[in-house]
Amino acid sequence: MIHSLRLKNFKPFKDQTLEFRALTLLSGFNGMGKSSVLQSLLLLRQSYQQRVLQRGLLALNGNLVRIGTAQDALFDGAEEEFISFELVVKLQEKMMWEWRFAYDQKADVLRSENVPTTPEIDEFCLFGDNFHYLQAERIGPRNVYEMADDMVRQHFQLGTAGEYTAHFLSLFGNCNINTIGLQKKDIQTNNQTIECQNQEMSKQLRHPKAKSFELKDQVEAWMGEISPGTRIYITSNTDIDLISTQYSFAVGNDISNKYRATNVGFGITYSLSIVVALLASPPGTLILLENPESNLHSRGQTKMGELIALAASSGIQVVVETHSDHVLNGIRLAVHGGKLRPNDVQLHYFQRQEKKGQTFTNVVSPRIDRNGRIDKWPDGFFDEWENSLDALLEPTRE
């Protein structure tokens, strides 16, 4: 897992160290730097995938993130012309890797002054298949979705917009949760030892009303928290590499007709990829989520927060960027219910400050206790409901 990340001269950060835990939540006003934290990790991953990070190069533009040029990446008030990323990770033991990239104003590929070469880098989840990034702009309802055997069958990916979620479910829907992607041979041979170990770890992650540990049953049960009685049907057309999803809804013993994805709204499609990623991933997976609350009712947002917390308790590291107090409350309820240890939660609140005429981002990190209570509430930290209530309680002016 990632233990900490230090950013120097990167976007709004002059020199900022952020601690990470099993569940790390990033919040704050727009434009404060939350996305920049995720982008720093994505830059490293896309550079590794392009096979340039191994040669000490950072690709600022790729399929995960597009920064532009070095001028767009450098902190405005930088006193030195370099950008530095320092990762402290926990593998068998704690390790520290640092990449320090020289500044070249118009370049879109930067060269590092040092190249970490430890073999453990190749095994780290940020650079391997045990990784998911689901961006804020996820794919909406479609009549058909693309199939991608290489991305899904070989690398267990859902796509950054969740575009391969239906294909993923069609291939792995009968596999037990928390096991998919451990090793290809384990998926193919249904290795019982692996499955038993992960069933024990996944007990909290399992929805109590699901028929089994199998991914499709678990996904339907958790999606039912967002839209009650959800049933999912997947139809593949391998001749043209397209796949479709339909939904029906059960109320008591009655089940509705099947509806196309385009006829059931954005909330279900937007959340489906997140639910699948959280349930399918084995221990040791890193998941980056942007705005998991998008298009969800407040109850669905709270349940999403609870599911995120349960995934974090099952050996998955989750980093969430969110504006939703309901997602936060779902996490707090999980801690209060003893489903996630408070020490496994890290909260970071990003706020803009000015000092000596220079604007920079300051990070406040409230702590959560075993009762789900938060020790400090800086101005703007999920306090809008209380502020609005205070205003409504004031006498009206004639």
Image (tube, grey):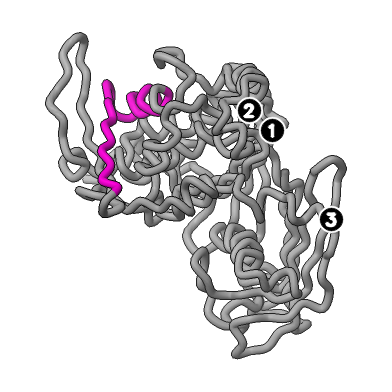
Instruction: Say which residue appears at 47% left-offset and 60% top-offset.
Output: 30
Q: Are marks 2 and 1 in contact (CB under 8 Å)?
A: yes
Magenta residues span 218-238
Q: Earlier in the sequence, mark 2 or mark 1?
A: 2
Q: Is residue 315 above or below residue 71?
A: above
Left or right relative to 151: residue 372: right
Q: Quadrant of residue 13?
A: bottom right
**Secondary structure under the numbered disc 2 in the rendered image:** loop
In the rendered image, residue 54, in percent from the top left (x then y), is placed at 74, 69
Instruction: Say which residue appears at 67% left-offset and 46% top-offset.
Output: 365
Q: Earlier in the sequence, mark 2 or mark 3?
A: 3
Furthest residue in direction top, as rendered? 253
**Secondary structure under the numbered disc 1 in the rendered image:** helix
Residue at the disc numbered 1 = 344
Between the C-alphas of marks 2 and 3, the distance is 25 Å
In the rendered image, residue 36, in percent from the top left (x then y), is placed at 58, 63
Q: Is residue 182 above or below residue 81?
A: above
Residue at the disc numbered 3 = 96
Instruction: Say which residue appears at 74% left-offset and 77% top-offset.
Output: 101
Query: Which disc number belongs to residue 313?
Result: 2
**Quadrant of image for the N terminus:** top right
Mark 3 or mark 1, whichever is nearer to me: 3
Mark 2 or mark 1, whichever is nearer to me: 2
In the rendered image, residue 153, in percent from the top left (x then y), is placed at 48, 45
Amino acid at dot 2: Ser
Looking at the picture, tell me which residue is in the foreground, 192 or 114: 192
